Amino acid sequence: MITVLQRPHGLCIRNYSLHYSHHRLACFKSMSSRPRRRRLPYSSCNIRCSSSAAPSPPPSPVDKEEAEDLLRKVPPINTLLRRFWKVAAPYWFSDDKVQARLQLAAVFALTLATTGISVGFNFLGRDFYNALANKDQEQFTKQLLYYLGGFAGGIPFFVLRDYARDTLALRWRSWMTAYYMERYLSDQTFYKIQSQSIIDNPDQRIVDDLSSFTGTALSFSLTLFNAAVDLISFSNILYGIYPPLFIVLLVYSIGGTAISVFLGKGLVTLNFLQEKKEADFRYGLVRVRENAESIAFYGGEENEMQLLLRRFRRAFENLTQLLISSRNLEFFTNGYRYLIQILPAAVVAPMYFSGKIEFGVINQSVSAFNHILGDFSLIVYQFQAISAFSAVIDRLGEFDDILDSSSKSLTDFSQEISLKYCNIQDSSTLESNGSMLVRKSQKLLDIENLTLETPTTKATLVRDLSLVINYKDHLLVMGPSGSGKTSLLRALAGLWVTGRGKVTFYVEDGDDSHPLASTDMAHGEVNTTSYMKEEFGRSINRKSRSIFFLPQRPYMVLGTLRQQLLYPTWTVDAIPVSDGTKKGSLPFLMRIQNSENARGQCNKPKPTTDDLVQVLDDVRLGCILSRFGGLDAVCEWSSVLSLGEQQRLAFARLLLSKPKLVLLDESTSALDEANEAHLYQKIEGADITYISIGHRKTLHAYHDRILHISTANQDSTHRNWDIESINRDTSYNLQKL
């Protein structure tokens, strides 16, 4: 009457005849049987190189990574418990805590009800088998009807318990996803993690690990609660039948737990590494897809095949070790599991043979024994599931620590570049005749004694740079590759803060929709190092400060052509949801959406459809409307548009936003000279001051000064830059020659 259900990863759930409820261990089905998607850590971009025949070769980056993997140890239990509480606690004290606690109480109440139903089935089973052994047909029929009635009344409780648990897990996951995404995207944390390779695979931790954590944490909590209730309910039954059987159960379960821990102690580390290594392989495939054209031009298919096979081989080797460890554990757990099928009957059989108990009591003792043994043997039965859950806790806890440290690092201003915004009054004046508005020279950017260093190696790129950018004072930055031109833009954008010096942007009243941090600052000065975090922890929004950054390869968002043009200054209005969807929506998810809509908007009116069509014509991209079917067409824009078209689309964004100052990082490198000249004329005609990075001499014609940056000598203390003026007319004539 006892069957064994084998589940993936060695997870076994026993189902004992008609009277045994499977409610307790079935809670783990969501974490063991659900397939998990794995992704690569973006930081893991090195490939293991074959060893050289030369003596004592220097270790490759991947060899070092593999050595670190081998040395990785299981975190101590106190670290896992601390990380579990740190990850799990915020939701239960959040704005959604009332609803969450009510749902949790309902789940526990339903779990308690299912335990009571299981106890009732235990006694029904005793009477049912007594009637069967006594050949009492009338009593047998009566007990059978009781059984059927119990099924009809009890099954809804089990179904509702599972549904309530799963909906609570989904609600918890939704809140945590919004919570972690908000922290991940604030304070440029996502950029720091990516650029400095701080941890592997943050996307998998948000998507997969959070899903596994919430479902598994609830399942374990309910299982532990149910185990406590089972111990109280069934211990009395078992002890009342035969006290020595209870002693046998304690010895058997404690011994089994100790042996399981010893045999499976390496599974936590292996599960952690398997997540990482399979993600490496997946990301390798993603890179092939994203760089398909470049690989095809190079004819690099064979190289990619070798690289992918190496990554898969690493995952295969680790999975082999994981299977061996699981096999060794299964040898014990299977024997442990099957032995209990006869152990309780063997202990109480002498009492039955002597006539001290009835036949149904044997069945009752077996059921009670298995209930209690399941409570005592959770570690034995669920060791692989526990090890996988421990790996999830470790990864999420590590991620949470990184998010906290990134936020706290903003308060450490030692050896950091000071980035400030000053709000000033418009200095425009009228001529004496009152007929024309004349704008005086206005300071837009002031760089004072800026020394820029790389974040990791602390190598100096720019030393002691000082310059001022005024209105219509267009600056061209030139220098050899690797001298630090793009890094200078990173420092101006606040992405790199390693070094010293002061960078001040000046914006007019009305350009900044945020309140000032201090009224004591001259001209409404705002120090972003101290004012970097606002409500909800969001970083300062440069879109509202009339400053625009244009990278060499523009970012193409996922969405329509309209969204491409409005990004990042405006957002497209959310599609209205139906009433049915509103009823099922969660307030914190709607809050995130509304928060984005509110904070993503600047104080400028959103362009109309006619404005968007006109700006495409202005950058000579009007043809793409007919090519793709209008502004609301959805495509993989980074693939269907050439790099030159993408750069012109980025200029369309710039013309729509109309900032006071724009920083261009080789933003016309893929354009011909005619289109380059046309775009520079457009942005100058739009009253936009610009700082450009480039190598072409044709750019001289559109700028007033050149900042030359040379490669810094690390042993020197002299500056590695100089500034010279440009005669635009001379530059234009030289270009014509």
Image: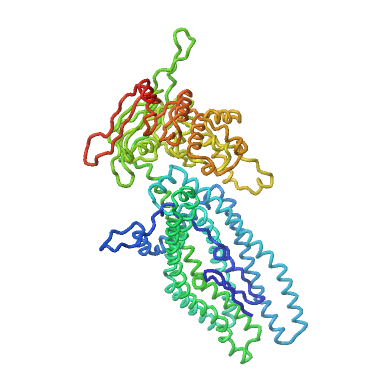
Q: Going 75% across and 85% down the picture, which residue do you hit?
A: 136
Q: Nearer the viewer, residue 703 or 555?
A: 703
Q: Nearer the viewer, residue 320 or 414?
A: 320
Left or right? Give the position of 611 relative to 401: right
Measured as percent of width and height from the top left, residue 688 is found at 45, 26
As drawn, 529 above or below 19: above
Colour scheme employed for the rendering of this structure: rainbow
Q: Quadrant of residue 609?
A: top right
Q: Is residue 443 visible?
A: no
Measured as percent of width and height from the top left, residue 646 is found at 50, 37
Q: Going 37% across and 22% down the picture, which residue do you hit?
A: 733
As drawn, 44 above or below 382: above
Left or right? Give the position of 183 relative to 241: left
Measured as percent of width and height from the top left, residue 637 is found at 54, 42
Q: Nearer the viewer, residue 413 or 42?
A: 42
Looking at the rendered image, the quarter that the C terminus falls into is: top left
Q: Quadrant of residue 231?
A: bottom right
Q: Going 58% across and 74% down the picture, which residue do you hit?
A: 371
Q: Nearer the viewer, residue 515 or 461?
A: 461
Q: Going 55% across and 50% down the picture, which residue do you hit?
A: 175
Looking at the rendered image, the quarter that the N terminus falls into is: bottom right
